[in-house]
Amino acid sequence: MSSPTSSVIIKGIGSFTPEKILTNDELSKMVDTSDEWITTRTGIKERRIAGKGETAATMGAIASERAIKDAGLEVDDIDLVIVATITPDMPFPSTACLIQTKLGISNAVCFDIEAACSGFLYLLELGTSLLRGGKKYRNALLIGSEKISSILDWEDRTTCVLFGDGAGAAVVSLSESEEGLIDFKLGADGNKSDVLYMPGGGCSLPATLDSIEDGKHFLKMRGREVFKLAVKVMEQSAVEILEQNDLSPDQIQCVIPHQANLRIIESISSRLRIPMERFFLNLEKYGNTSAASIPIALDEAYQSGRLKRGDLILMVAFGAGLTWGATLLKWTK
Ligand code: ACO
């Protein structure tokens, strides 16, 4: 645990989801699926789909404005902007630089990271370390923003029913009096990179007529394997972070899990012996929004009055890579 002078808190939180709703019934007219199949296998009822002109940068910018306002800060108070995304507006420049320009942040270090659905938990440790480290930065804007609809094969029923678009952002700041972000337990295993990936578009397979024809620019997933690995790594990282901090599961007031699949979350709940009532869920409305999933859920939990000052919150995620992580947070707002 950190000393008070090097403590970092979540000072502001905000999110944005596109207006357009795509329901399970509408999807079942596009591919061979049904509301019944999607609901029983995943818990998802609908998802948001970005409209023309909506991108990771535009959605991330709106979520960021809301987070900065919630923090009671001005754009010029932000000196670090980091975005987690697997759907950047373009390979370069970074989505963080695009958001910087949209918001008019004049003096900040800006870059992107990529840890798929674990991206926001990676950001929280990275942002906290940079704030604590050199005393160069005071307020970091951490953004998870995804337009997953742009990399889905809308003819593949095994993937297109699972995902949605959206953005969430947090302003994290140094605090002399309170400790908010308590501990982090991140992990990765590149040996499992082939269970969830997008083969095309990088330097190993740049876009060609053939690569497009072969569907190489779509997300590929071996769902069952991802399911089993997700349950294992999320349980492991959650147990480790609780043990490291001498906490028992009943001391956690709220769990914010990555919103991928209700059955995965139910499995984690029973393995951790934390009842489902203490898990915050919104996947029925948004599906899996990858790096945006946890910050959107954290914002909605806060806005709905679910989080009380002093509550201990456990956030837990997994994603392509494989990557995973657990984060312990004391709510200070
Ligand atoms: N509608 C109807 N039937 C379907 C659909 C669909 N949308 N998708 C698959 N099926 C069929 C399959 O073809 C299969 O049919 P068959 O038995 O005739 O071959 C049957 O349903 C069962 O398929 P499974 O894949 O075995 O179904 P499962 O119960 O494993 O559920 C699911 C699939 C929902 C994808 C599940 O495995 C899962 O949630 N896995 C985790 C996925 C996940 O969380 N991914 C996100 C990772 S995070 C990131 O970094 C992006």
Image (cartoon, helix red, strand yellow):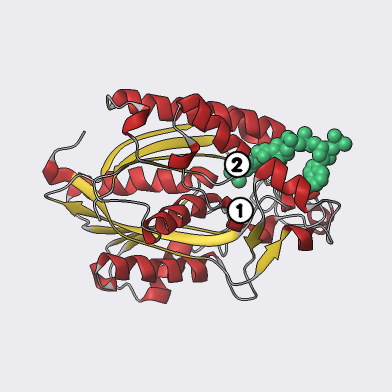
Name the image quarter holding the C terminus.
bottom left
Displayed quadrant of residue 102 = bottom left
- Tell me the kind of residue under disc 1: Glu
Residue 149's x, y, as percent?
A: 67, 60
Mark 1: few/some/many CA within 10 Å (<14, 14-19, 20+): some
Task: Examine the rendered structure and indicate whether residue 145 appears above or below residue 319.
Answer: below
Name the element at disc 1. helix
Query: Residue placed at 16% from the left, 52% from the top?
Result: 175
- Side of 6 where 41 appears, left or right: right
- Side of 147 where 133 appears, left or right: left
Tell how many labels: 2
Task: Examine the rendered structure and indicate whether residue 122 appears above or below residue 172.
Answer: above
For the residue pair 58 and 266, the one nearer the viewer reads as 266
Name the image quarter holding the N terminus.
top left
Residue 225's x, y, as percent?
A: 68, 30
Please report whichever mark, 1 or 2, sits nearer to the chain's N-terminal start: 2
Query: Residue placed at 86% from the left, 52% from the top?
Result: 32
Q: Do we see residue 91 in this rendering?
A: no
Displayed quadrant of residue 55 = bottom right
Quick check: marks 1 and 2 in contact, CB under 8 Å? yes
Residue 133's x, y, as percent?
A: 21, 44
Task: Examine the rendered structure and indicate whether residue 327 appears above or below residue 241.
Answer: below
Q: Which residue is mark 2?
A: 262
Check residue 255 in the rendering and tell me which mark sits there, or answer none: none
- Tell me the kind of residue under disc 2: Leu
Q: Do we see residue 34 in this rendering?
A: yes
Q: Which residue is mark 1?
A: 284
